[in-house]
Image: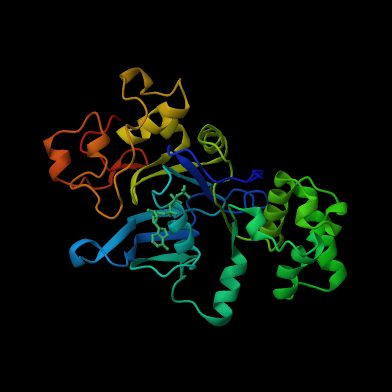
Amino acid sequence: MGVPARHRARRRRGGGRMTAPAAAECAPHPTARPPLVTVEDLVKHFPLKGGAFGRKQRVHSVEHISFTIAPGEVLGLVGESGCGKSTLARAMLGLTPIDSGRVLFDGIDVAGTKGRGRKALRRSMQRVFQDPFAALDPRMRRGTSLDAPLAQHCLGPREERHERILQVLGQVGLDASFLDRRPGECSGGQLQRVVVARALLLRPRLLICDEPTSALDASVHVVRHVCDRVAVMYLGESVEVASREDLFERPAHPYTQALLTASLPEAPGAETGLGAPRGEPPSPVDPPSGCRFHPRCPKARDRCRAEAPALDAIPPGRTVACHYPSA
Ligand SMILES: Nc1ncnc2c1ncn2[C@@H]1O[C@H](COP(=O)(O)OP(=O)(O)OP(=O)(O)O)[C@@H](O)[C@H]1O
């Protein structure tokens, strides 16, 4: 991955997040192989306490999301703050119960796996946390916190584990002196490298990086250079999934065009006058009827207000949820 910076998108437009196999350690595999990850029609709502006039309200955080990730593939998830990226990532890792749908890792249902199987899955699926300060115990020296996951999974004697830690520290550009440092003795960037090193230690087959860059522009540029495919999320839904080239050169959904225009002045669509997304996203507690993007979409027509668009395949190899896509 090689993306060690810490991040929490503060701008409302377009936080970015990478969902990726451990690309730093895995050679790319032919995409014809069975998917490593299959997300099928995933739904996650959070019930809200109270609610106006006694109505039960729910946050529609993830709505019927489906995609696959091939072994060795890097999938980027992009969308504005609050569109559901973290919730989706947590659901993929089995860290949050889901309402419906399923996540398969190498054909195994993540939600239905317990005990030893669960422990093995946890080792194969690692996450780089958004906040390295929260992810690392401030009292522990780095050497101890790096050894903990290896010891927990009984991965070799102490000397072997030490060798592995030095190897991974080298991969993220840190030297052995970091083994004796506590978090307060490291810079934010160095800490984020430690967090990445810790995720790589167990040689995961899936690495989920939660917002590897802190600003929208950097996020979009990183996605552009690192990802094989990109999924664009809006208000809990997937609105476009395409190869990096298609997405950046021929964005089909007006929301994708708006996101790109907001961060890349030369983006296709900039000349169409679509501009950056207008205003703030609507509430995920009471999402708009029809296409959820219609209140902000300059191309919206009556059909968009009445009828939710399906995520349709637009050859070659991309899907778009829009009644009037550009491509
Ligand atoms: N435990 C929870 N209870 C209620 N609502 C929640 C909970 N967790 C997340 N949400 C809501 O679900 C929606 C999606 O949140 P999520 O954190 O997944 O978005 P995100 O795209 O990762 O945002 P960001 O880029 O800011 O991290 C938001 O409206 C959020 O407020």
Left or right of 115, for residue 196: right
In the rendered image, which quarter is residue 7 located in?
top right
Left or right of 120, for residue 229: left
Foreground: 178 or 285? 285
Say above or below: 204 vs 239. Answer: below
The residue depicted at 76 percent of the width and 64 percent of the height is 139
Foreground: 265 or 278? 278
Q: In the image, residue 76 lies at what x, y percent? A: 49, 45
Q: Quadrant of the C terminus?
A: top left
The residue depicted at 35 percent of the width and 32 percent of the height is 277
Say above or below: 286 vs 263. Answer: below
Q: In the image, residue 101 lies at what x, y percent? A: 34, 65
Q: In the image, residue 313 lies at what x, y percent? A: 29, 44
The residue depicted at 31 percent of the width and 25 percent of the height is 274
Say above or below: 1 vs 205. Answer: above
Q: Quadrant of ligand 1?
A: bottom left
Q: In the image, residue 89 lies at what x, y percent? A: 48, 57
Foreground: 157 or 12? 12
Left or right of 158, for residue 217: left
In the rendered image, which quarter is residue 276 located in?
top left
